[in-house]
């Protein structure tokens, strides 16, 4: 599959009387977007705000982060199965608004939601302090169940991102990147002397409020399968989960998966990037056994020499991670796993909930239990009502002087397990 990503560089976001993109500036009329949000009867109001890098602004509780895109050539549209029809995407041309994001926020759904600081020490831990953020704070109707609220906000975010993306459909890209995958036979013939390398992407699927969607299907319902990485770039995988903010994969990170980007950069040079395998993270042992067995089988059937394995979340998913690693290695396929650590505030606890000698090549995104003091900022987009109950916080988090004492676990993307962040270790 061959996909062109045309990059439209956004240098500023401003509110205006009409919505348009002009000379790199995104002009937004909130009145154009409000009906798009409120077409869902579960939401009674929405407010829009803008947060720019360096501003004394805190966004919380953060639910999802999305990059606006629009399909201009080829089959399907962005977010297939969610917004667009269920056509196979991943080929043709897609325009992406780079340097900005749509951020959804609102009353807390689960305790595992996050904070984005646009300045100060917290900003150094999150990639989304570097983006121009159009923030939509959604208010639910009374007595709405948590999972219904999560779905309503998730879908509203996709609709708004799609609406904004469409503003770029007639623009010329500032830069175009081409990503192309080979068929199995073609790859063997084209790169006979290069190692065959794959990417095993573990998707968070542990239950209500811990969900990821593939072409609109809750990934709890899938068995491990092969997908073209260009499909993922085109919005085939989206987030619907409330895992800890530090290692959550918002939709933006699926769209801009850094493992995929780096593997494409080496495709045909250091190795033959054969495919992406998606698998789920399960709750029950039998389901973990099934998925890890089938993942290892796919790696063997594809005659892979090595794979990179990434996860999402911690604790229970650590078992899925180690089972995948151990079984893939047992098939003669070398593995590198990408994870983060929950090693305690002093860094002396066991980093993962599971371990095995086969896991001897590990990339870490950092220790989520590291403690940090976040200063009081001038403006909060969203609300601080729930800050003491976010995972990584405590009943003493919000201090009298307005500062926050937290683990970096509360910061969106701080220890991301796809490597979409700033922390690691040697």
Image (spheres, rainbow, N blue to C red):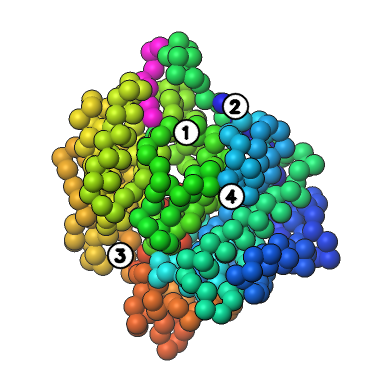
- Contact between marks 4 and 1 (CB within 8 A): the answer is no
Q: Is residue 84 above or below residue 148?
A: above
297 on left or right of 84: left
SS at badge 1 = strand
* Nearest to N terminus: mark 2 or mark 3: 2
Q: Quadrant of residue 398?
A: bottom left
Per the rendering, the mark at residue 381 is: none
Q: Horizontal placement of 34 versus 294: left or right?
A: right
Tell me the SS state at disc 3: loop
Residue at position x 40%, y 85% in the image? 399
Task: Determine whether, in the image, residue 218 is placed left or right of residue 298.
Answer: right
Q: Nearer the viewer, mark 3 or mark 1?
A: 1
Neighbours of disc 3 within 10 Å: few (<14), some (14-19), many (20+): some
Distance between the alpha carbons at the discs numbered 3 and 4: 35 Å
Q: In the rendered image, which residue does mark 4 sit on?
A: 82
Marks 2, 3: nearer the viewer: 2
Marks 3/1: CA–CA distance: 34 Å
Is residue 171 something one can see in this rendering?
Answer: yes
Indicate the position of residue 291 as horizontal and vertical percent values: 30, 40
Disc assigned to residue 369: 3
Q: Which residues are magenta?
A: 192-198
Q: Residue at x 24, y 42 (%)?
A: 289
Indicate the quadrant where residue 379 lies.
bottom right
Q: Residue furthest right?
A: 17
User: Is tag 3's residue or tag 1's residue first in the polypeptide sequence?
Assistant: 1
Task: Count the numbered circles shown.
Answer: 4
Residue located beneath label 1 in the image: 227
Q: CA distance from mark 4 to mark 1?
A: 18 Å
Give the camera-side residue of 183 and 39. 39
Residue beneath disc 2: 2
- The quadrant of the image that shows the N terminus is top right
Which callout, 3 or 4, points at the residue further toward the start of the chain? 4
């Amino acid at each position: 599959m061959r996909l062109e990503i045309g990059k439209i560089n956004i240098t500023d976001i401003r509110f205006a009387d009409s919505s348009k993109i002009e000379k790199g500036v995104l002009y937004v009329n909130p009145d154009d977007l409000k009906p798009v949000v409120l077409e869902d009867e579960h939401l009674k109001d929405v407010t829009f705000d803008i947060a720019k890098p360096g501003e004394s602004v805190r966004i919380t509780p953060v639910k999802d982060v999305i990059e606006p895109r629009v399909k201009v050539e080829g089959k399907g549209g962005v977010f297939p199965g969610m917004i667009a029809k269920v056509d196979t995407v991943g080929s043709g041309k897609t325009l992406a608004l780079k340097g900005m994001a749509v951020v959804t926020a609102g009353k807390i759904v689960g305790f595992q939601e996050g904070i984005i600081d646009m300045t100060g020490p917290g900003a150094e831990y999150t990639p989304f302090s570097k983006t121009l953020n159009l923030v939509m704070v959604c208010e639910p109707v009374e007595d709405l169940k948590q999972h219904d609220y999560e779905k309503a906000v998730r879908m509203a975010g996709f609709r708004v991102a799609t609406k904004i993306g469409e503003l770029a459909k007639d623009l010329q890209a500032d830069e175009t990147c081409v990503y192309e995958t080979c068929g199995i036979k073609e790859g063997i013939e084209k790169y006979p002397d290069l190692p065959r390398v794959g990417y095993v992407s573990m998707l968070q699927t542990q239950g209500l409020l811990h969900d990821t969607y593939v072409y609109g299907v809750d990934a709890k319902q899938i068995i491990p399968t092969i997908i073209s990485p260009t499909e993922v770039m085109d919005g085939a995988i989206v987030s619907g989960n409330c895992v800890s903010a530090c290692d959550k994969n918002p939709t933006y990170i699926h769209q801009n998966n850094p493992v995929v980007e780096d593997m494409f950069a080496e495709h045909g040079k250091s190795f033959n990037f054969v495919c992406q395998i998606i698998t789920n993270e399960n709750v029950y042992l039998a389901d973990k056994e099934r998925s890890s067995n089938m993942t290892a089988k796919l790696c063997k059937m594809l005659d892979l020499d090595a794979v990179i394995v990434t996860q999402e979340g911690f604790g229970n998913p650590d078992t899925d991670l180690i089972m995948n690693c151990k079984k893939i290695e047992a098939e003669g396929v070398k593995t590198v796993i990408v994870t983060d650590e929950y090693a305690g505030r002093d860094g002396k606890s066991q980093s993962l909930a599971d371990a095995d000698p086969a896991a001897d090549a590990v990339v870490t995104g950092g220790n989520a239990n590291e403690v940090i003091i976040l200063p009081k900022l001038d403006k909060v987009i969203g609300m601080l009502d729930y800050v003491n109950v976010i995972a990584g916080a405590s009943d003493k988090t919000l201090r009298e002087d307005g500062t926050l004492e937290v683990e970096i676990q509360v910061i969106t993307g701080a220890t991301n397990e796809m490597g979409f962040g700033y922390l690691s270790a040697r």
